Amino acid sequence: MPTAPLLELDKLSTHYVSAAGTRVVRAVDEVSLRINAGETLGIVGESGSGKSTLALTLMRVLPPAARIVSGRILLEGEDLVRKSEEEMREIRGKRIAMILQDPMVSLNPLFTIGDQVAEPIRVHEGVSRATAWTRARELLRAVRIPSPVTRLKQYPHEMSGGMRQRIVGAIGISCEPRVLIADEPTTSLDLTIQAQYLNMLRDLQQTHGLALIFITHNLGIVAKMCDQLAVMYAGRLVESGPVSRIFRAPSHPYTRALLNSIPRMGDPDQRLTAIDGQPPDLSNLPPGCAFAPRCAQAMPRCRDAAPPPFMPEEGRTSRCWLAEPVAAGADFRVANGVV
Amino acid sequence: MAVIEAAGLAKHFPARRGLFGGAGGTVRAVDGISFAIERGQTLGIVGESGCGKTTTAKLVLGLEVPTGGTMRFEGRDVHRLDRAGRRHYRKSVQAVFQDPYASLNPRMRISAIIAEPLTTNEKLPPAAVRERVLELLQLVGLPARAADLFPHEFSGGQRQRIAIARALALSPQLIVLDEPVSALDVSIRAQILNLLRDLQARLGLSYLFIAHDLAAVAHMSHMIAVMYLGKIVEAGEARALANNPKHPYTEALFSAALPSHPDERREEIILPGEVPSPLNPPAGCRFHPRCPQAMARCAEEAPELRDIDGRILACHLFDDAAAIAAPTGTGAAADRQEAVSLASSPLQRASKAATGA
C-alpha cells in the first residue's frame, strides 16, 4: 500500500468569470494530479493552456476574477481550498512556495537582498533580524552566490539576471517548504547560466527532499529535470505519467505532436511535424475534445463528447478516445481522478 | 558564390561616461569577425547575451556602421557603394524579428504592411502591388482575405508569416532571422521553421539565423558560428559542429543545451561564473577565466582563428594540431570540399587578413 502523496489535486477547477458574469473561461478544468516528496513534476502547456493559473490556484493567489469552483488541493492530507486567507498565510512560503518567472518583478528594487531573503523567515518563524540575516547568508551560500555577506547588503539592480534568479530561489526555499513551484524559472537566462541554475535546483531538492513542480512550455526542461509529466491543453490535463514512458510512447495525439515538433540535436534531416491551427479560445471551447480541430486522428465522436481521463497503463492518464480500453467491462479502468 | 562575406568586421561603441564622469572606454561588441554565407544556405550564429550576435545582425542589415573590417555583397564592398548600389543592397537584405506583436504596425492593414517596401522602393501601379501582395500571402500560407485585416486579428504564428511576407516583398537574397520563433508557442514553432526551410529551397534564399535554441539553429543551419564576447571562437559545418564541438566554450554551450529526450545523457560541463562585460574583456583568450582547460598561455596570448580539420577554431589547445595539419592536410581538404566552402576559404583568408592588418 503506497503512502499518501505529499500533494494531491482532485478534480480541481478554476474559472475566470467576466464582470457581467456572461463569459466564463475554464482556465483549469477538472485537473487531478499527485506528487510525492522528492519527486519532480513538469506541467507543460502552451500559453493559454491554464498551467500558470493552476500554479496560482495551488498557491491560492488568484486574481479577483478567478474562482476555484470545485475540487480539492490536498497538501499532506489538508485541503487548501477550504483554508481561510489567514490560514493560507501560514502555509504560503512555509509549506508551499513559488519561484516566479521574472526576478526583476518578484524582487523589490527598494529593499536590500538581505531584507528580502530574511523577510519570510522573520514572518514565519518570528526570529530576530540578526538570526534571520544569518540564515539568509546560509541560503545565499546554498544557491552558490559568491561573497554572500557583501551581496546581502546590495540591491537587486546590482546583480546579474542569473544571480537575481538564484536569489528568488533562495527566498523560495527560505522556510524549507515541502513543495516548491517554479513557473518558467529559466526563460530569461542564458544557456550556461540556465545549466548552473537547474543543477542548483536539483541539489536543493535532494538536500531538502522537496517536491518540485516545474511549470514550463519547454519539453527540454522536462526531459532533463522531471520524473513525472502532466500535459495541459485548453485548461485540461490531456496526459500524465512518468516522463520516460511518455517520451518513449506518448498516448495523447497532442503530446505526440508536440514531441515531434521540436528539433532534435544532430538530426538536420528531420522534418518537423507542425501542428496545424492554433490553441483554442478558452471562453469559446468546442463541445468535444478541445484538441479535435487540430488533431490528425480526430474521429466524429471527438467533436461531440470530451473524453474522460482513461488509464492506458498503470500510473498514466490520457484524455483521448483512442486510449479507451477496448475490453468490455473495463470501465473501472477510467481513472476517476485518482483510483 | 558567397552572397555576403565579412572580413575582420568590428563594431566598437564608445562607452558613455557616467553621470559623474566615470571611466569611459570602448565596448567591443563585435571584434574582428569573419564569415561568409553562400547562396541558398543558412549561417547560424549562437552565443549568449553580450556575445555580439545582434550587433552582427545589425551590421549586416546596415543598421550600424562598422568601425573596422569589410563586408562584401556579391563581391562588392558594401561600404563603398554608390547610391544605386546602396539601394540595391538594402533591397537585397531583409529582416524578420523576434516579436511579431511589436514588428507590425497595429494601425495598418496587412496589405499595406506587406506593400510598404514595394511602394517605397519600386514604382508599381496599384493593381500590380495588390497582385504581388496576394502572391506573397499565398507564399507564406495565408488566405487572400488576410490582406484586408489588421494585425490584431492574427495569432503569433500568423503574424510571423506576415512579417516573413513583408521581408520577401522585394525578392531579397539574404534574410536576417533574429530569434524568429522564440516568441511563438511551441506548437507553432515547427510551422514557421518548416515554412522558412521551404522558402529557402524554393527561392534560393540565404539566411543569417540567430537564436539561443541550439537545436533549432542546428536544425536550420548549414554552417554555425559560435561567438563569445565579440569574437568567433569556432565555426564549421552545422552537423559536425553540433555533434562534435571542439572549442571548450562550444563544448560547454552544447552540453548545457536541454536534451530532447530523457534518455539522452550527456556529460554536462557546468561553466563557473558568468560572461564578463565586453567593456573590459579579459586579456588573452576571452574565455580563459571560465575555461575548464585553460593553460598559462591562454591568459597572455589571444589565440588566432585557424582551420583545423575543416573547422575554424580559436583555441590554444589546438596549437599542435594546427602545426601538424597545416603542411599535409589532405584528408582534411577532402572533408572540406564536402562541407560548405565557408569553412575553407573566406573565413580563413579573412582571418589572415585581419591579423595582417
Image (cartoon, rainbow, N blue to C red):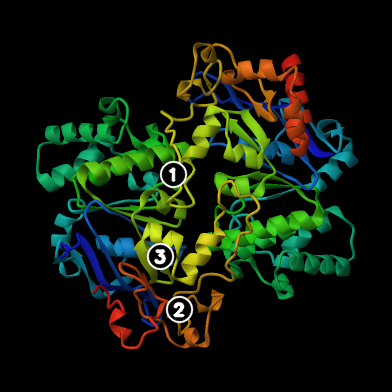
Q: Which residue does the numbered mark 3 point to in the structure image? A: A231
Residues behind callouts 2 and 1 on a single chain: no
Q: Residue A195's quadrant in the figure?
A: top left
Whole-Å distance between the Cαs marked 2 and 3?
17 Å
Please indicate whether residue B82 sits to the left or right of residue B301 in the image: right
- Parent chain of label 3: A
Element carrying mark 3: strand
Element carrying mark 2: helix
Name the residue type under label 1: Arg
Of B203 and B127, nearer the camera is B203
Q: Where residue B346 sits: x, y (%)? A: 78, 29
* Image depth: mark 3 or mark 1 in front: 1
Q: Residue A126's quadrant in the figure?
A: top left
Residue A39: in sight, yes or no? Answer: yes
Residue at 23% across, 49% down = A210
Whole-Å distance between the Cαs marked 2 and 1?
32 Å
Q: Quadrant of the N terminus of chain B?
A: top right
Q: Quadrant of the C terminus of chain B?
A: top right
Q: Which residue does the numbered mark 2 point to in the structure image? A: A322
Q: Earlier in the sequence, mark 2 or mark 3?
A: 3
